[in-house]
Image (cartoon, helix red, strand yellow):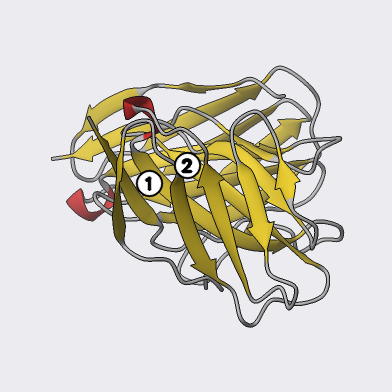
Amino acid sequence: DAKTTQPPSMDCAEGRAANLPCNHSTISGNEYVYWYRQIHSQGPQYIIHGLKNNETNEMASLIITEDRKSSTLILPHATLRDTAVYYCIVRVVFGNNNDMRFGAGTRLTVKP
Amino acid sequence: SAVISQKPSRDICQRGTSLTIQCQVDSQVTMMFWYRQQPGQSLTLIATANQGSEATYESGFVIDKFPISRPNLTFSTLTVSNMSPEDSSIYLCSVEGVFNNEQFFGPGTRLTVL
């Protein structure tokens, strides 16, 4: 079962920052926070992941609270092509039990 | 990153038949995963397939219904057996990246059972 809670949907204006929240209050010390997105009819695409420090790459930023019970994915300048379902996932990275468990995700709609 | 291809990309099948889905990766990977995504739903893990050992199935999925082969480090197949309309879904394979602990997903196989 997924260990995360996300709002089912969000809207964002094109060019503005999209901030997608995720609650993972039962996260364990050895679990990372991963974000993926799925554009209609395609396989999920990796965005970013982190353990406890904030992370940034060319796609997005990941802000993890100090207690690690929640995080926010930030798309700094959303475009229409960012319209997708965004999944927040917690998983163990090392060891034998590191499969990916998907929740319902947040459907982000970027509007012109 | 790993490049993953799946065959077929889509198929329409009759009730009671079986379909084998192929997953090919452009590099050697230890862990491969098979997921199902029913219409309008999120992804559900079917099984984990490691080379050289039997696949490990999640609760609600059994080997007789979803037999999996993993003959080498770049290839796996998932068979959907004795299909019914409830098996209509997108089936996706994924692999664990070597260096960045990412999981890469294939494009999926869209199955419709009539």
User: Which residue in the structure is indicated by mark 2?
Assistant: A37
Determine the residue located farthest toward the bottom in the rendered image: A26
Q: Position of residue B62 (x, y in %)?
A: 50, 62
B8 to B31, vertically: above or below: above
Find the distance from the CA under tag 1 to the CA under tag 2.
5 Å
Q: Residue at x 52, y 73 (%)?
A: A1
Mark 2 chain: A
Mark 1 chain: A
Question: Can residue B64 be seen at all in this image of the molecule?
Answer: no
Q: Residue at x 82, y 43 (%)?
A: B52
Determine the residue located farthest toward the left in the rendered image: B114
Q: Position of residue A78 (x, y in %)?
A: 41, 34
- Given the image, on which type of amino acid does mark 1 rest? Val
First of labels 1, 2 by sequence position? 2
Question: Can residue A112 be seen at all in this image of the molecule?
Answer: yes
Q: Position of residue A13 (x, y in %)?
A: 29, 39
- Given the image, on which type of amino acid does mark 2 rest? Arg
**SS for dot 1:** strand
**Label number found at residue A85:** 1
Q: What number of labels is visible?
A: 2
Residue A111 shown left or right of residue A51 in the figure: left
Q: Residue at x 77, y 21 (%)?
A: B27
A52 to A83, vertically: above or below: below
- Split into 4 quadrants, where in the image is the C terminus of chain A? top left
Q: Of residues B90 and A8, which is closer to you in this image?
A: A8
A77 to B80, vertically: above or below: above
Q: Of residues A88 and B78, which is closer to you in this image?
A: A88
Q: Residue at x 56, y 73 (%)?
A: A3
Q: Of residues A100 and B20, which is closer to you in this image?
A: A100
Q: Position of residue B17 (x, y in %)?
A: 28, 39
